[in-house]
């Protein structure tokens, strides 16, 4: 801003000086003409060159500042019209270059956000289509008298409605987490109790699949300062994912240990087929799932956002045919 102010002041002074010189030259020529004496050409030519140099400096300065600013104004208009792929050349004085870099970074973020919005809209539309088709088909059959209004035809409709409700709840949670709007109610929490509660949800389904679930936590594991409801949601998502891909006569292991420097590590491991190499880098993205998966593809994305909201991190380790380990780290009080 200081350089811009100095430039504007310099331009004003040069313009004033140029006008003064032109006026003085005109008055001098008029005086010479009235006196009948010849003009002093060396002085006149020197003044002419001086005025020309001043004007050249003004034009060069205006071009140096004016062209980049003009490009920024034009690019801002394109962004206003919805074109987020615009980019301006980084040139001019330091302040103008900094402004151009900030503008380009803003435009890039807007472009990525728009691409994510479109992708999310396409994914949500795809996820909603199947349950809505089932609901519509069954209700039309009931209304037309093709199907009787018995549990065999009403229960599928109820299940699809529940699936829609879960999908909407997951999307709301994910949206709040990504926007940083989650309200974490932290309190000292016994991880052992929390782990047993999460595992208890899956023991009946695991027994039906002949899958064992083992909790392995040290007896002296310290209390951790977390939102117990949100962390339980994370563990439930991780366990649900592990159970979904666990074969019969296998085991799921939930373990925890205290790391150095105030961190705790929780792992959920299964003995399933593992995650394909092409899917592993995208595992925590929204609606990312294997072709044979029956889930919505939101559970792990939500789990990572909830862990990150606690200041932690969530990673996956997997190899084809060797199972999967989901590893989360959380900061704990020393």
Image (spheres, grey):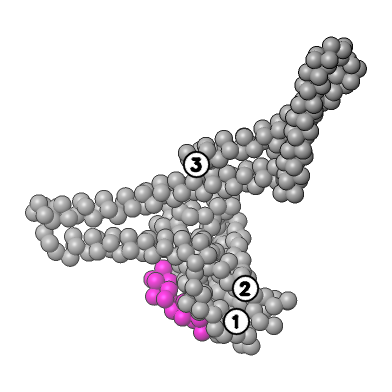
Which of the 4 quarters of the picture holds residue 52?
Answer: top right
**Do the numbered discs 3 and 1 sit on residues whose CB atoms are within 8 Å?**
no
Crowd rating for badge 3 (residues with CA inside 10 Å; few <14, some 14–19, many 20+): few
- Pick the residue in front: 20 or 82: 20
Viewer-proximal residue among 331 and 241? 331
Q: What element does badge 3 sit on?
A: helix
Query: x and y percent of residue 269 in the render?
Result: 56, 68
Please tell me whether mark 2 or mark 3 is closer to you in this view.
3
Q: Which mark is residue 224?
A: 1
Q: Which is more N-terminal, label 1 or label 2?
A: 1
Q: Nearer the viewer, residue 82 or 35?
A: 35
> In the rendered structure, which disc, 3 or 1, sits on the residue that comes first in sequence?
3
Query: Residue at 46% across / 61% down in the picture?
Result: 175
Any mark on residue 80, and which?
A: 3
Q: Main secondary structure of the magenta part?
A: helix
**Given this view, does label 3 or label 1 mark the residue nearer the observer?**
3
- Residue furthest to the left in view is 145
The residue furthest front is: 35
Q: In the rendered image, which residue does mark 2 sit on?
A: 330
Q: Please give the range of residues in magenta.
A: 193-209
Instruction: Name above or below for residue 320 compared with residue 42.
Output: below
Is 262 placed above or below 179 here?
A: below
Q: Is residue 136 left or right of residue 26?
A: left
């Amino acid at each position: 801003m200081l350089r811009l102010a100095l430039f504007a002041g310099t331009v004003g002074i040069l313009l004033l000086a140029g006008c003064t010189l032109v006026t003085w030259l005109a008055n001098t020529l008029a005086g010479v003409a009235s006196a009948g004496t010849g003009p002093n050409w060396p002085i006149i030519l020197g003044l002419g060159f001086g005025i020309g140099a001043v004007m050249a400096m003004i034009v060069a300065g205006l071009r140096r500042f004016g062209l980049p600013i003009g490009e920024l104004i034009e690019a801002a208009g394109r962004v206003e019209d919805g074109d987020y792929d615009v980019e301006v050349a980084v040139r001019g004085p330091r302040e103008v270059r900094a402004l151009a870099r900030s503008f380009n970074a803003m435009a890039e973020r807007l472009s990525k956000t728009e691409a994510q919005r479109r992708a999310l809209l396409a994914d949500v539309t795809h996820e909603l289509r199947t349950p809505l088709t089932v609901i519509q088909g069954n209700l039309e059959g009931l209304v037309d008298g093709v199907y009787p209004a018995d549990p065999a035809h009403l229960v599928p409709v109820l299940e699809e409605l529940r699936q829609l409700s879960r999908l909407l709840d997951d999307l709301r949670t994910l949206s709040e987490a990504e926007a940083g709007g989650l309200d974490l109610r932290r309190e000292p929490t016994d991880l052992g109790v929390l782990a047993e509660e999460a595992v208890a949800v899956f023991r009946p389904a695991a027994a039906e699949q002949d899958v064992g679930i083992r909790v392995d936590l040290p007896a002296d594991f310290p209390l951790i300062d977390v939102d117990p409801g949100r962390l339980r949601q994370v563990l439930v998502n991780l366990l649900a994912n592990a159970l979904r891909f666990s074969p019969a006569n296998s085991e799921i292991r939930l373990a925890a240990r205290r790391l150095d420097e105030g961190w705790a590590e929780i792992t959920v491991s299964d003995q399933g087929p593992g995650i394909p190499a092409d899917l592993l880098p995208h595992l925590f993205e929204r609606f990312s799932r294997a072709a044979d998966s029956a889930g919505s593809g939101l559970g792990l994305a939500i789990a990572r956002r909830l862990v990150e909201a606690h200041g932690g991190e969530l990673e996956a380790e997997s190899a084809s045919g060797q199972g999967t380990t989901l590893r989360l780290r959380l900061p704990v009080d020393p």
